[in-house]
Structures are given as structure tokens and as C-alpha cells.
């Protein structure tokens, strides 16, 4: 059983056999709660495209130099979509970690499926909420993009563990 000094143990004999206290559940689920809280914050009128364009353009131009208005519209669109992909990818990993810790006797694929369902539910609720804001809109395509981000991050994590820490997966089978 591997003990990761920098974080929680993912699958150990202790988590499989000992009762778990409130500290365990907080450590398992606080990243999910934090991720959902960030999405709730970003799902407001304050983070609509009309409000993020100025600060993002300033940052982009500080790094890469001046950009025309036409080019900026395209760049801004892709920056926001990349944010969806990466943000929900991180949330998908938080869900995966929480399920991995909470259900140590289950296989990775089951935990990954639960993580994807959690991510999809948050994404769908986020898009539904945005339909009620005057400067935002909800899109099923954004939910799909969010789920693709979660799947990509989960796949990358699986490949990392499979290549560099295979005993983590072996201990779960």
C-alpha cells in the first residue's frame, strides 16, 4: 500500500477496514465543494463575456502584444471555452478523487463514471442557471465541452497512474 506524503492515501488497508471520521470525509470531499463553489461564483453576471473581455484582453496583450478587435473576438471565445474545458476537467478530477477515497473497494472505471455524472450534473445546472441571466446564455454544447474536459483529465490521470503508479490500480482490483 502506497503512502503519498504530500496528500491523502488513495487506497490503503486503513481506508478499506477502519471506520472513517469526519476529518476523512472533509478531506475527501472539500475539493469537490470548492470546485462547485468556484463554478457557482463564475456563473454570475460578473463573469459574462461582456465583463471578462476587458481584463482578459489586457492580460493577453501584456503577454503577446496588441491584437485587433476582430482577432480578439475569436481569441476571447477560445479562451473562455478553454476555461470551460480545463475548469470542468479539474472538477472532474476532484469528483474522481472523492469517489476513489470514498469507495476504495470499487474499480477505477466505476469511480470515473460517478465522477463524470457529478461533473455533468454541475455543468447542466450551471448552464440552466445561466439562461436566467441577461448577459449569459445556457448551451448544451457547453455541457458537452465540460464533460469532455472531465473525461480528458480522468483519462490523463488514469494513464499517469497506469504508467507510473500501477500498484494504486492493482490494489483496487
Image: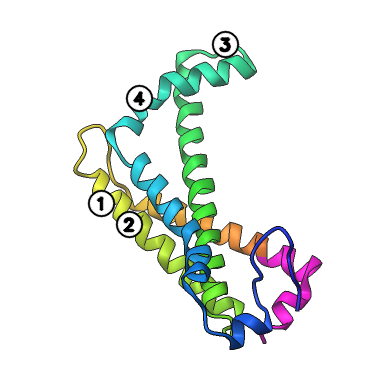
Question: Which sits earlier in the primary sequence, circle 1 or circle 3?
Answer: 3
Image quarter where the C terminus lies is: bottom right
Which label belongs to residue 66? Answer: 3
Q: Main secondary structure of the magenta part?
A: helix
Residue 31: % across, % down: 50, 57
Q: Is residue 96 left or right of residue 157?
A: left
Which segment did they paint magenta?
A: 158-173
71 or 96: nearer the viewer: 96
Which label belongs to residue 128? Answer: 1
Query: Could you say whether the residue bearing mark 4 is in a helix, strand or loop?
Result: helix
Query: Looking at the picture, does residue 11 appear above or below residue 56?
Result: below
Question: Would you name the residue on which mark 2 appears?
Answer: 124
Question: Which sits earlier in the primary sequence, circle 1 or circle 4?
Answer: 4
Question: Which sits earlier in the primary sequence, circle 3 or circle 2?
Answer: 3
Image quarter where the N terminus lies is: bottom right
Query: Looking at the picture, does residue 107 appear above or below residue 138?
Result: below
For image coordinates 53% across by 70% down, the residue present is 24
In this view, the mark in front (1 or 3): 1
Query: Could you say whether the residue bearing mark 2 is in a helix, strand or loop?
Result: helix
Residue 3: % across, % down: 74, 70
For image coordinates 52% across by 58% down, the residue present is 150
In this view, the mark in front (3 or 4): 4
Q: Are marks 2 and 1 in contact (CB under 8 Å)?
A: yes
Amino acid at each position: 500500500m502506497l503512502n503519498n506524503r504530500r496528500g491523502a492515501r488513495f487506497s490503503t488497508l486503513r481506508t478499506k477496514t477502519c471506520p472513517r471520521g469526519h476529518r476523512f470525509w472533509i478531506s475527501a470531499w472539500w475539493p469537490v465543494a470548492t470546485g462547485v463553489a468556484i463554478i457557482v461564483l463564475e456563473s454570475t453576471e460578473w463573469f459574462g463575456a461582456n465583463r471578462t473581455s476587458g481584463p482578459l484582453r489586457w492580460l493577453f496583450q501584456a503577454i503577446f502584444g496588441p491584437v485587433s478587435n476582430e482577432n480578439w473576438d475569436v481569441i476571447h471565445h477560445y479562451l473562455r471555452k478553454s476555461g470551460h474545458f480545463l475548469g470542468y476537467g479539474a472538477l472532474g478530477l476532484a469528483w474522481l478523487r472523492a469517489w476513489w477515497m470514498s469507495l476504495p473497494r470499487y474499480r477505477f472505471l466505476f469511480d470515473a463514471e460517478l465522477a463524470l455524472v457529478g461533473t455533468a450534473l454541475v455543468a447542466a445546472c450551471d448552464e440552466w442557471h445561466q439562461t436566467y441571466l441577461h448577459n449569459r446564455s445556457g448551451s448544451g454544447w457547453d455541457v458537452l465541452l465540460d464533460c469532455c474536459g472531465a473525461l480528458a483529465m480522468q483519462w490523463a490521470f488514469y494513464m499517469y497512474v497506469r504508467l507510473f503508479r500501477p500498484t494504486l490500480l492493482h490494489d483496487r482490483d
